[in-house]
Image (spheres, rainbow, N blue to C red):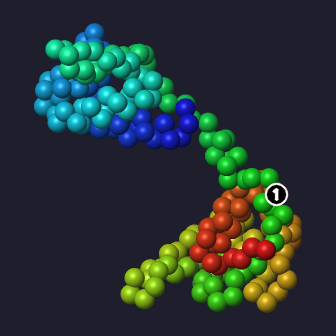
């Protein structure tokens, strides 16, 4: 199951009426949205949305039937056990495309970010950035992991030469096992104009 499907399942299965709809589906051969809605005192669209979502996830079978030439759908259980199995490794592949560690970076001019140094060690513990303009401007504080803090502590100044992400990691002694979290913070700070890429 991919993450989006799992999120959809989780969102619907957490509804306070989910168990009751499944109880109907287990006990009835099949059921329509209007039958489920009237049985559970729900709005018909609420029941319809739930049944449609479960059908799209392959948990229910949806069958079109006719009553006095008017078509509608009936739903029945396709499986009586639901398992959520998410491969989180797929998220790592999306976050770490080939070659990103070889990109040249440095701090942007007039980035306006405020880095806070850790109390006892030479690394940053957090970075504060400002989002928006004028009165709508909001402060956002990002707490850094130790590898991220060490990495950003050696980020070249705006007037310095660019360095690759891999070079900065090597310079700071940050192991490649931390590459995904380094790339994540670089991507976020680039988005807010704190880091520039070449």
User: In the figure, 136 relative to 180: above or below?
Assistant: below
Dividing the picture into quadrants, the one containing residue 79 is: top left
x, y percent for residue 173: 84, 66
Q: Among all residues in the image, which is located at the extreme top?
A: 29
x, y percent for residue 132: 47, 80
x, y percent for residue 15: 29, 38
> Who's the residue at 63% across and 78% down the image?
193
Horizontal side, residue 176 vs residue 80: left or right: right
Residue bearing the label numbered 1: 99
The answer to whether any part of residue 118 appears in the image is: no
x, y percent for residue 103: 80, 67
Which of 59 and 66 lies nearest the eye of the viewer? 66
Horizontal side, residue 167 vs residue 21: left or right: right
Dividing the picture into quadrants, the one containing residue 32 is: top left
Number of residues whose C-alpha sits closer than 10 Å to that of mark 1, classed few (under 14), some (14–19) or many (20 or more): few
Q: Secondary structure at mark 1?
A: loop
Quadrant of image for the C terminus: bottom right
Dividing the picture into quadrants, the one containing residue 122 is: bottom right
Quadrant of image for the N terminus: top right
> Who's the residue at 69% across and 76% down the image?
195
> Who's the residue at 66% across and 65% down the image?
187
Which of 46 and 187 lies nearest the eye of the viewer? 46
The answer to whether any part of residue 38 appears in the image is: yes
Which of 114 and 74 lies nearest the eye of the viewer? 74
User: In the figure, 178 relative to 143: above or below?
Assistant: above
> Who's the residue at 61% across and 36% down the image?
87
Count up the numbered dots.
1
Horizontal side, residue 128 vs residue 182: left or right: left
């Amino acid at each position: 199951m991919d993450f989006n499907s799992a999120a959809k399942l989780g969102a619907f299965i957490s509804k306070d009426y989910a168990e009751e709809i499944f109880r109907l589906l287990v006990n009835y051969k099949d059921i329509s949205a209007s039958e489920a809605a009237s049985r559970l005192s729900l709005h018909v669209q609420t029941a319809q949305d739930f049944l449609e979502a479960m059908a799209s996830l392959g948990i229910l079978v949806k069958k079109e039937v006719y009553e006095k030439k008017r078509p509608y759908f009936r739903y029945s259980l396709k499986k009586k056990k639901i398992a959520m199995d998410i491969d989180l490794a797929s998220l790592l592949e999306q976050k770490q495309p080939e070659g990103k560690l070889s990109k040249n970076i440095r701090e942007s001019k007039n980035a306006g970010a405020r880095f806070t140094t850790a109390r006892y060690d030479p690394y940053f513990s957090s970075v504060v950035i400002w989002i928006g303009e004028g009165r709508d401007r909001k402060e956002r504080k990002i707490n850094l992991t130790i590898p991220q803090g060490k990495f950003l502590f050696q980020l070249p100044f705006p007037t310095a030469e660019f360095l690759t992400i891999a070079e900065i990691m090597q310079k700071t002694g940050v192991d490649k096992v931390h590459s995904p979290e380094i790339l994540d913070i670089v991507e976020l700070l680039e988005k807010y104009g704190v880091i520039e890429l070449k």
